[in-house]
């Protein structure tokens, strides 16, 4: 299944099928004015990367695999620690340091909903390294038509 991010237009597709078929680290599937949907595939033993988004709430749902979620108020104080698997949801409040590590024996397939929009529409990152490179270069910015906070504190990465 191929999903094309058509921006803030009505959209409908089989989200579970799209998530399970996605092989990219992160693929932006839909970008609205206020929120965004990305599909993620995390290889065995790898993670999404320890980070905090000061102005972005996130909802994540696993559709395949097993993971370990760690969250906390500081990157060296991750006092929330929970194993998750297919069907589990993870809620990440804005400003919370978080990471999800694949602890299973197959790729961990999940989707993430960001509010506000966090990535460039339709952006596909095959690997974590590709995503980091685009963020550092400014090549993964939310679209001008999305509603962003009035102040723009930078995301934090460990």
Image (spheres, grey):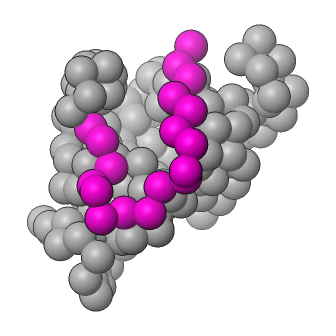
Q: Is residue 131 left or right of residue 65?
A: left
With respect to residue 83, does 127 lie above or below? above
Residue, far front: 150
Q: Main secondary structure of the magenta part?
A: loop
Between 137 and 26, the one lying in front of the other is 137
Image: magenta residue range: 140-158
* Residue 22 appearing in the image: no
Figure quadrant of the C terminus: top right
At which x and y percent is residue 42?
A: 40, 35
* Residue 35 appearing in the image: yes
Q: Is residue 41 left or right of residue 24?
A: right
At which x and y percent is residue 53?
A: 58, 37
Residue drawn where x is 61% and y is 46% of the image: 55
**Does the magenta-highlighted stretch encompass residue 156?**
yes
With respect to residue 52, does 46 lie above or below? above
Between 153 and 51, the one lying in front of the other is 153
Number of callouts? 0
Q: Is residue 153 left or right of residue 75?
A: left
Between 89 and 130, the one lying in front of the other is 130
With respect to residue 9, does 94 lie above or below? above
At which x and y percent is residue 121?
A: 23, 56
At which x and y percent is residue 90?
A: 67, 53
Residue drawn where x is 30% and y is 65% of the image: 145
Figure quadrant of the N terminus: bottom left
Residue drawn where x is 31% and y is 19% of the image: 136
Residue, far right: 79
Residue drawn where x is 26% and y is 28% of the image: 138
Between 63 and 29, the one lying in front of the other is 29
Give the quarter of the image for residue 46: top left
């Amino acid at each position: 299944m191929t999903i094309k991010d058509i921006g803030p237009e009505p959209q409908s597709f089989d989200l579970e099928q799209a998530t399970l078929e996605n092989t990219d680290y992160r693929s932006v599937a839909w970008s609205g004015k206020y929120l965004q949907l990305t599909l993620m595939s995390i290889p065995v033993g790898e993670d999404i990367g320890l980070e905090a988004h000061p102005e972005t709430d996130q909802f994540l749902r696993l559709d395949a695999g097993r993971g370990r979620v760690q969250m906390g108020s500081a990157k060296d104080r991750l006092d929330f620690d929970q194993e998750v698997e297919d069907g589990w949801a993870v809620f990440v409040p804005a400003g919370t340091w978080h990471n999800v590590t694949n602890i299973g024996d197959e790729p961990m397939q999940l989707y993430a909903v960001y509010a506000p929009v966090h990535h460039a529409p339709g952006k596909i990152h095959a690997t974590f390294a590709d995503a980091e490179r685009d963020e550092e270069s400014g090549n993964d910015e939310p679209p001008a038509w999305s509603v962003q906070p009035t102040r723009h504190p930078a995301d934090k990465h460990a």
